[in-house]
Amino acid sequence: MLLAATRRRSQVGSRAVVDFGRQRVPEGSHRAIASEPHPSSDAAGPTRPITRRNFIVWYLAGLLTATVVAIVAPILIFIYPPQGQTKKQSTTIKLDRALIAIAANEAVKFQAPPETGFIMADGGGDNAPGKVAFGGFAAKDAAGQLTVLAWTCSHLGCSVAYAADARQFQCPCHGSQFDVSGKVVHGPAVAALSHLDWKQGANSDEIIISSYQLKGIG
Ligand code: FES
């Protein structure tokens, strides 16, 4: 009797347990399931191979992205100067002669200091009030009236030059011409050159112009 009971217990035991080393866990229990290795949790499992084709595609994509960023970023910064880095100010410009020494139909060129942009007071075409110019002219018309103009062409923004013999500002890009007061003489520009807000400085050869401080630009 005792022998039969012992044999039955031994048979049940051999069917119902799984040996995990020293610990014996009943087969089908949560503990047993949790202990079984999971295919996706294997750290040394299969990884996606880096083929030559994948490598070249990613390399070219990175190169293209870097090129686009390098071209577009400075343009965007120029058009939309970052807030906090743009401060309105007055900039004193020293001309190469006194204002009174500028003759009729003459224009004196000047340039903005580094990280400074002159503020256009008006404008049409590609120019507009509040836009930035990095240089300009102090010019007197035939009547001796002094005006200060941005050098930015109202067509597409090239810098004009003053041709003293023709008494005109001329654009090297598409040939627009402006008289000494900035009005259009010949297109394709249809709008006059922009004026700059200015006043005379402490010295006779100085003018003070409304401008922006542009950190990291110019
Ligand atoms: S940008 Fe001056 S004529 Fe076109």
Image: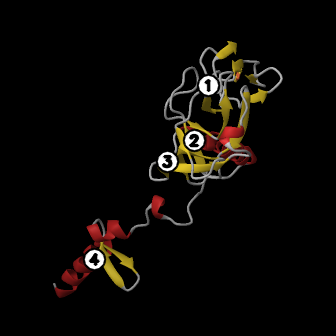
Q: Would you call the spot at circle 2 few (<14 residues within 10 Å), some (14-19), or many (20 or more)?
A: many
- Residue drawn at x 30%, y 76% is 25
Name the secondary structure under disc 2.
strand
| Callouts 2 and 3 close, C-beta under 8 Å | no
Image quarter in which the N terminus is found: bottom left
Disc 3 is placed on an element classified as loop
Closer to us: 73 or 117: 117
Q: Which amino acid type is marked by label 2?
A: Phe
Q: Is residue 115 left or right of residue 179?
A: left
User: Label 4, on which residue?
Assistant: 13
The residue singled out by tag 3 in the image is 82
Q: CA distance from mark 4 to mark 1?
A: 101 Å
Residue 107: quarter of image: top right
Residue count near mark 1 (Cα–Cα under 10 Å), binned few <14, some 14–19, many ≥20 = many
- The circle on residue 118 is 2
Residue 213 placement (x, y as % from top left): 54, 51
Q: Mark 4–mark 1 contact, CB under 8 Å?
A: no
Measure the C-alpha gap from mark 2 to mark 3: 16 Å
Query: Percent from the top left, x then y, of residue 128?
Result: 52, 27
Mark 4 vs mark 1: give the one in front.
Answer: 1
* Picture quadrant where residue 97 is located: top right
Q: Residue at x 32, y 80 (%)?
A: 24
Residue 196 position by quadrant: top right
* Camera-side mark, 3 or 1: 1
Give the image location of residue 58, x and y in percent.
67, 46
| Structural distance between the alpha carbons of marks 1 and 2 | 14 Å
Q: Residues within 10 Å of mark 4 (few under 14, many from 20)?
A: few
Question: Marks 2 and 4, how far apart in space?
Answer: 94 Å
How far is mark 3 from mark 1, CA to CA?
A: 26 Å
